[in-house]
Image (cartoon, grey):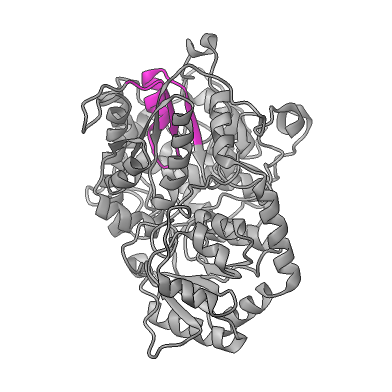
Amino acid sequence: MVGEESGCGVEGGTGGGEVPAASAPNGDRSGNSRLAVPSSSADDRGFHRSSTMPGVIKNDEITNESTGPSNLERSRTERRRQNNPTIDPAKQLLDERIPIKKKLKMLNRIATVKDDGTVVVDVPSGLEPTIVGGTEDIYTEAVEEALDGTEILYRPPMQIVILIVGTRGDVQPFVAIGKCLQDYGHRVRLATHANFKEFVLTAGLEFFPLGGDPKILAEYMVKNKGFLPSGPSEIPIQRKQMKEIIFSLLPACKEPDPDTGIPFNVDAIIANPPAYGHTHVAEALKVPIHIFFTMPWTPTNEFPHPLSRVKQPAGYRLSYQIVDSMIWLGIRDMINEFRKKKLKLRPVTYLSGSQGSGNDIPHGYIWSPHLVPKPKDWGPKIDVVGFCFLDLASNYVPPEPLVEWLEAGDKPIYVGFVQDPQKMTEIIVKALEITGQRGIINKGWGGLGTLSEPKDFVYLLDNCPHDWLFLHCKAVVHHGGAGTTAAGLKAACPTTIVPFFGDQPFWGDRVHARGLGPPPIPVDQFGLQKLVDAITFMMKPEVKDKAVELAKAMESEDGVTGAVRAFLRHLPSKAEEQSLPQSSGFLEFLGPLSKCLGCS
């Protein structure tokens, strides 16, 4: 999810003040935590230092899932590989005959959960990246229908639910998509957290509240993106919130409007990956589902999972399965309870119900293909649709003091942070002074902007839409949420990203790779000289030229319309609808997963 420093406040984030740095769990001050294998003790609730591991893995579950066919003969080599987890641990994650406990130990050896909610993957020596060859693995845009055609495929009016878990930055693109679908005659219900009700209703869409406490979720997801809590104390909080969300997905698809009582029966589902349980609801209701997200969730050889830290290209695909497996292990028991009690479906086994991206489920990614082109190993059911912007600038009336300050001098540099506000503010002001630049400091989200004395070259701002503000800035410095990054690039602003969690380093790397800004500055390395150097880099004419070039390319994109085209294009035909949904069994998942791991 994209917990962003907002458009001077909350455009891309949820608000809630300063986000404190996570403390290292169990006295580990290194910022790392290995995954702990669950024991049978009643007080030992699973993976002590991994957020996503199940609270309890029952012995009978382990026994049942580890039992293979009694008449299946295996070679000595196969038996040795199963009994020795050090051999091909990545491939062994695919083997249903291996008990869960052994698979957990494999994850424990190759995955380390960091305090920032990311996973460091130790790539096994000798692991070869997938050898991509032939039409099975390489796809070209030429064989796909273009998303920028003049016509949107007509479909009879449908009732569509959009299931979104995340921050304001996650919800906002789907408000834009929902409005476009509504313009084409479809009824759209956006189901998300209760604190976004007014935002959704004001946009003209129907709203349905997902479970969970909005205040807890806002504080939690801004810090942890809802995936991998940094310490054991957060596991009960995460699991309680996620269970309430999961169990609210079915009502979101079929219950009447909570305010008007108007009936609702879903015909199709749009969801983002953190809406855990989305595919299971689609299976139960026999309706198509389309996944959209603001960061990569489909395995590729071109870059690692944004929530992982992998240096070796051979481990890029593996990183997706590692993150996916850890998330799945943390919610598996809740998903199976949901399937049995609410959906009346059979439970799913280890990895077979994983959140991984199967070949049959269409995916759309919400970023500019001019910034991150579609990987060549993504198939025809995966689209990069462009950034999805919601126009907030047209109705914004800026305060007169801001207008006067902007007109009084050169364009400023926008700076928005959330950590250590007093120290950050002092560094920012000093760096602006050294470089001779004016600056707008966003004090609305992280508490920045308390100046010991007024400075005429600094303006402190509370709330302002990014799509209005960034047009008046020469460069931007922020933590690197997807929406904030997109808004800055659309406004042709050179960008410095100071990541502190989640997918922010991914966007920092992409921006630097395109020459649009300096290398990302990890928040724990941020200092006066680093910021001075970053500002100096952004002021180079060639950097501005590249930012202008990308902004012009993005002008030709319409991510919202592209997303709607992709959704309608991938809807099944009448004949295909009769077979919906595909089985969530292990064999279906095995194909794409084996490619993810580089297996034959």
Q: Residue at x 37, y 33 (%)?
A: 277
On the image, the x and y values in percent for residue 121 come to 55, 54
Q: In the image as oriented, which residue stretches furthest toward the bottom? A: 453
On the image, the x and y values in percent for residue 188 come to 39, 30
On the image, the x and y values in percent for residue 359 come to 58, 28
Left or right placement of residue 258 versus residue 231 in this view: left
Give the magenta range: 265-291
Q: Above or below — where is 498 with respect to 330?
A: below
Left or right placement of residue 426 versus residue 474 in this view: left
Q: Is residue 268 magenta?
A: yes
On the image, the x and y values in percent for residue 392 come to 45, 52
Q: Is residue 498 magenta?
A: no
- State the residue in front, 555 or 240: 555
Q: Residue at x 45, y 70 (%)?
A: 417
Q: Residue at x 62, y 44 (%)?
A: 317
Q: Residue at x 25, y 25 (%)?
A: 255
Q: Is residue 475 visible?
A: yes
